[in-house]
């Protein structure tokens, strides 16, 4: 076992048994306790804030009750960040994107070829217990934000159940549970997802015109997306606090006329529209001519709104954020092609067939699925098999603890962490530039997950 693994085991043990301070008293706790999203939502919906506040003496102000998001995040004590998730450029990867399906109910021209993509055999795809297990390994190492994506995540049959299980990892340090979706079949699942702890939705929408939607996505469904978006805004008015971003891929000659209408969506609505530079992936017929650089998009906005200006964002933001004075919403630009944001990259990806992809634009991948399945003769691990494996590990660890006094991580987890750590250390400083990217072999975007 490597020295790094031993160190990791020790810090993991210390973290799991560190004292918690609640109500002024210190006590040992294994998991942090949280109220469920369902409880939070119910309270906020059934108890609207009073219209009039009592007059208070300065210095004796009653504390505002925490919002649903604050309660879900349960801002933790700072913890030491995992060396396995820190790369050679000191980038700490606390954000994991998991693709939960290769399937999609749209065929966006910029994302995949018209004929669709070759799907993996079902046995090659991660099962729900495998996704939950991998999520827990990453959260234990310091990942505090997980985004489910795809393909289209909402077409996965058990997506709500999967979110419920991942949502439980809030007790281990997960703060954000996010979804990137085309919104077509989101509406019916939204309430249950919010109950599971959903904190943010990135909704892909490239046009406000029904006709152009059908051309760009090669399918109908514009009104279904709008219905989902409006439901999120409505839930937010009731206190759900879901961060809403609209992802809009801008292509020259196709939808750049929509930039202003999209900006104006934020006039009265609390959302962020993010204009994305068109990127090259296998099978999407990318050309530089069709790619509209963000400076051009900004110039289009400046013509109508000269006072548009920079807004402060988060250090790890992938987008440059702007605001039109007086508008409620914000605007963002994802400038992967003209001005990369690799220096502050904190993202890792797991594909639906279980590969860890440390960079969106790199074809280096390692299979976490194969390591996971070693304990199940290479077969997919269902719930029953997962319980059995955990039991064996527990027994082994208890045997270990009675002889050494330390619990430590399982062999499987140790091997996973070694492989993850090595892949993260191999991560390049930044992606190849334009001119090289379009010639690089990479998966189609639908098989990576945005
Ligand atoms: N199906 C979901 C959706 O569309 O939101 C999630 C997966 S999709 C691959 C994730 C994001 O990638 C979407 O916001 C989509 O607009 C973006 N995307 C896909 N192909 C792209 C490309 N060639 N250039 C830029 N963004 C792209
Ligand atoms: Fe499907 Fe999303 Fe790709 Fe569009 S961008 S084809 S919705 S995976
Ligand atoms: Fe991170 Fe790679 Fe994207 Fe750069 S290209 S921001 S390194 S994932």
Image (cartoon, helix red, strand yellow):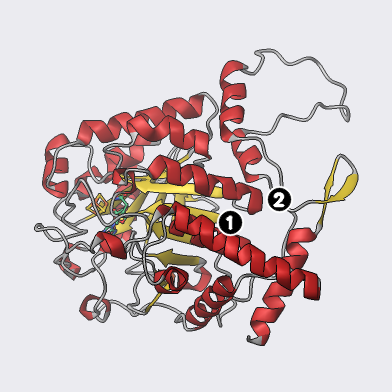
Residue topped by disc 1 = 144
- x then y, percent, for residue 74: 68, 45
Name the foreground residue: 282 vs 313.
Answer: 282
Q: Residue at x 51, y 75 (%)?
A: 420
Residue topped by disc 2 = 31
Q: Which mark is residue 53?
A: none
- x then y, percent, for residue 423: 47, 80
In front of the other: label 1 or label 2? 2
Q: Is residue 322 above or below residue 196?
A: below
Q: Secondary structure at mark 1?
A: loop
Q: Is residue 358 above or below residue 201?
A: below
Q: How busy is the neighbourhood of tag 2: few (under 14 within 10 Å), some, or many (20 plus)?
A: some
Q: Residue at x 41, y 69 (%)?
A: 369
Q: How busy is the neighbourhood of tag 1: few (under 14 within 10 Å), some, or many (20 plus)?
A: many
Name the foreground residue: 165 vs 390.
Answer: 390
Q: Residue at x 56, y 27 (%)?
A: 41
Q: Is ligand 3 less than 8 Å from the beta carbon at label 1?
A: no
How far is disc 1 from disc 2 in space, using C-alphas? 15 Å
Q: Is residue 82 visible?
A: yes
Q: Give the mark nearest the N terminus, 1 or 2.
A: 2
Q: Is residue 28 left or right of residue 284?
A: right
Q: Is residue 38 left or right of residue 365?
A: right
Image quadrant containing the N terminus: bottom right
Q: Is residue 133 above or below residue 190?
A: below
Corner quadrant of residue 83: bottom right
Name the foreground residue: 315 vs 128.
Answer: 128
Image quadrant containing the C terminus: bottom left
Residue that lies at the very extreme toward the bottom in this rendered image: 2
Q: Secondary structure at mark 2?
A: loop
């Amino acid at each position: 076992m490597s020295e790094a693994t031993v160190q990791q085991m020790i810090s993991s043990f210390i973290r799991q048994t560190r004292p918690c301070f609640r109500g002024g008293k210190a006590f040992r706790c294994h998991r942090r306790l949280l109220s469920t999203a369902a409880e939070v939502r119910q309270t906020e919906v059934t108890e609207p804030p009073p219209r009039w506040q009592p007059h208070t003496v300065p210095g004796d102000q009653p504390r505002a009750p925490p919002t649903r998001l604050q309660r879900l995040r349960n801002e933790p004590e700072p913890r030491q960040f995992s060396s396995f998730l820190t790369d050679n450029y000191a980038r700490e990867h606390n954000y994991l994107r998991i693709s939960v399906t290769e399937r999609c109910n749209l065929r966006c021209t910029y994302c995949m070829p018209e004929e669709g993509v070759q799907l993996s055999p079902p046995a090659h795809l991660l099962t729900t217990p495998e996704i939950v297990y991998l999520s827990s390994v990453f959260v234990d190492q310091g990942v505090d934000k997980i985004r489910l994506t795809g393909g289209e995540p909402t077409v996965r049959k058990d997506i709500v159940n999967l979110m419920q299980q991942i949502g439980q990892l809030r007790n281990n340090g997960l703060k954000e549970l996010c979804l990137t979706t085309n919104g077509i079949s989101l509406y019916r699942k939204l309430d249950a997802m919010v109950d599971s702890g959903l904190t943010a939705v990135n909704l892909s929408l490239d046009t406000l015109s029904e006709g152009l939607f059908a051309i760009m996505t090669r399918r109908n469904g514009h009104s279904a997306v709008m219905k989902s978006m409006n439901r999120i805004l409505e839930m937010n008015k009731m206190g759900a606090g879901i961060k809403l971003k609209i992802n809009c891929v801008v292509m020259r000659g196709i939808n750049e006329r929509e930039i202003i209408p999209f900006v104006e969506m934020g006039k009265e609505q609390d959302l962020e529209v993010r204009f994305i530079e068109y990127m090259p992936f296998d099978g999407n017929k990318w050309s530089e001519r069709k790619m509209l650089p963000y400076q051009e998009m900004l110039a289009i906005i400046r013509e109508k709104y000269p006072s548009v200006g920079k807004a402060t964002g988060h250090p790890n933001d992938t987008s440059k954020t702007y605001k039109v004075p007086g508008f409620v919403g914000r605007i963002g630009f994802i400038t992967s092609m003209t001005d990369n944001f690799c220096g502050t990259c904190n993202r890792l990806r797991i594909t639906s067939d279980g590969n860890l992809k440390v960079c969106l634009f790199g074809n280096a991948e390692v299979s976490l699925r194969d390591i996971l399945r070693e304990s199940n003769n290479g077969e997919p691990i269902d719930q029953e098999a997962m319980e059995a494996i955990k039991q064996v590990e527990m027994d082994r660890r208890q045997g270990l603890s009675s002889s050494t006094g330390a619990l430590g991580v399982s062999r499987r987890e140790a091997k996973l962490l070694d492989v993850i750590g090595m892949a993260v250390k191999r991560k390049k400083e930044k992606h190849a530039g334009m001119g090289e990217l379009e010639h690089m072999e990479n998966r189609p975007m639908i098989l990576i997950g945005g």
